[in-house]
């Protein structure tokens, strides 16, 4: 309260500025601290003393050179010189508070984020060495990301990490979320809507697939959607084949994945998946990155499987003994391939239309 009253009664910064020229270092420190608190009120007057404050900032022997940099940064901000303001804010080190809720802090943080993201984008295109980035700028961005994560602003942190091409921070933000599946879905949408560079989008999706596969119960539907964008039909075929070799519920998941893939109308990809499924044998495939499906007990009775229609099974079943597991897998595979080819969707659509047009 006393500080607020004192600030309100000050009508000029002239007296404070005069202390900058005193030989006693204590007076200079007091002047800088006072200027830092009133710079928003008297920045036009303080701007006339910028050279004196800059000399303190450039003096390596001066104990509070970071404070001097912060004061100069604020003056330049109020004068509308954001580039200079950011430059001196970087020199202010930890005195530049990334958690400060002020127009000054928010404007410079946005500027820092844009500068860092622009550099990372240019570096990726020109294959420049990453060490060329100003380490002070990188420190500011990392502090911003850490603050968002600590404050529980995970979506904001994930958006910033994607924009700044910091996939390590993206993984950290996702791992800290209570709802990891929700966070991964958010990141998938983020990559599709806001990442225009194809190669970088692929990097993001591969990162998300890697995280999905570390979960106790991976979302195979989302994994396969990502893999389709990445153009990896063999991996999708491996996942589908392993699901078909699992329990009845796993087979249903495989069917649902197939229906969703068909909706994307990528016929070339679906054809490649089908061809790779033809080359698989039951139980042969394995999920990528050493992942295994939480499959449960393999069904031994094909009659207990979900009925998808009048699909043909092994024609010579009665001719000679057939392994029940292989027969069940073959039946499921036939149903899955019918879905991938689009035949099942057409059949179900016709059945629906017929049932609703009967008199």
Image (cartoon, rainbow, N blue to C red):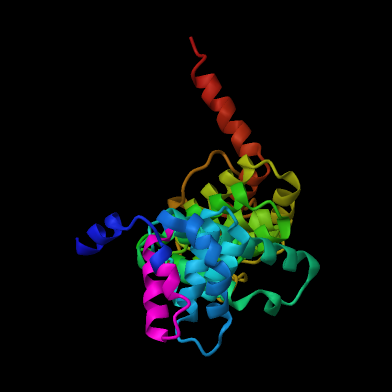
Instruction: Please tell me which residue is depicted at 48% across the width and 44% down the height of the picture.
Output: 307
Most distant residue in the right direction: 126
> Where residue 63 sits in the image (x, y, percent)?
45, 86
Is 312 situated above or below 63?
above
Q: Main secondary structure of the magenta part?
A: helix
In the picture shown, does residue 96 fall above or below 221?
Answer: below
User: Toward the viewer: 258 or 279?
Assistant: 258
Left or right: 179, with 61 as reference point:
left
Q: Residue 285 in the image: x percent, y percent?
A: 62, 69
Residue 280 quadrant = bottom right
Relative height, residue 55 to residue 201 (above, below): below
Q: Is residue 227 left or right of residue 158?
A: right
Name of the residue lying farthest toward the top: 359
Is residue 219 in view from this perspective?
no
The answer to whether residue 203 is seen in the rendering is yes
- Residue 36 on the magenta segment: yes
Provide the residue span drawn in magenta: 16-39
Residue at image position (47%, 63%) is 218
Where is residue 306 shown, x and y percent of the image?
46, 47
Q: Is residue 22 magenta?
A: yes
Does 272 sit left or right of 67 as displayed? right
Tell which of 138 and 327 is nearer to you.
Answer: 138
- The foreground one among 30 and 259 is 30
Q: Quadrant of the N terminus?
A: bottom left
Residue 41, position as x, y percentages in the image: 40, 54
Quarter of the image for residue 94 reads bottom left
Q: Residue furthest bottom?
A: 61
Residue at x-position 65% and y-position 37%: 343
Give me the residue at 59% from left, 48% from top. Answer: 258
Between residue 151 and residue 295, name the one nearer to us.
Answer: 151
């Amino acid at each position: 309260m006393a500080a607020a009253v004192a600030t309100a009664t000050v009508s000029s910064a002239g007296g404070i500025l005069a202390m900058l020229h005193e030989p006693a270092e204590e007076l200079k420190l007091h002047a800088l601290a006072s200027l830092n608190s009133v710079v928003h009120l008297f920045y036009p007057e303080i701007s006339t003393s910028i050279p004196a404050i800059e000399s303190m900032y450039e003096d390596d022997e001066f104990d509070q050179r970071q404070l001097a940099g912060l004061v100069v940064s604020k003056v330049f901000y109020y004068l509308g010189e954001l580039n200079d303001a950011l430059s001196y804010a970087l020199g202010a080190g930890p005195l530049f508070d990334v958690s400060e809720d002020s127009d000054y802090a928010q404007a410079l943080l946005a500027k820092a984020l844009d500068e860092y993201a622009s550099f990372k984008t240019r570096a990726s295109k020109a294959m420049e060495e990453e060490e060329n980035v100003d380490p002070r700028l990188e420190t500011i961005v990392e502090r911003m990301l850490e603050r968002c994560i600590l404050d529980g602003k995970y979506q904001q942190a994930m958006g910033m990490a994607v924009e700044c091409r910091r996939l390590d921070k993206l993984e950290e933000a996702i791992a800290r979320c209570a709802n990891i599946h929700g966070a991964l879905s958010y990141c998938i949408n983020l990559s599709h809507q806001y990442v225009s560079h194809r190669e970088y989008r692929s990097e993001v999706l591969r990162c998300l697939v890697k995280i999905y596969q570390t979960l106790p119960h991976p979302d195979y539907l989302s994994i396969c959607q990502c893999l389709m964008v990445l153009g990896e039909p063999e991996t999708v075929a491996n996942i589908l084949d392993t699901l078909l070799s699992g329990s009845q519920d796993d087979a249903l998941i495989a069917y649902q994945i197939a229906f969703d893939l068909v909706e994307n109308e990528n016929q070339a990809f679906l054809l490649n998946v089908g061809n790779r499924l033809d080359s698989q044998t039951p139980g042969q495939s394995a999920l990528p990155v050493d992942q295994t499906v939480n499959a449960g007990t393999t069904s031994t009775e094909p009659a207990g499987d979900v009925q998808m229609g009048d699909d043909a099974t092994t024609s010579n079943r009665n001719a000679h003994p057939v392994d029940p597991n292989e027969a069940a897998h073959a039946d499921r595979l036939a149903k899955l391939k019918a879905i991938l080819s689009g035949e099942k969707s057409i059949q179900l659509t016709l059945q629906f239309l017929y049932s609703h047009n009967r008199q």
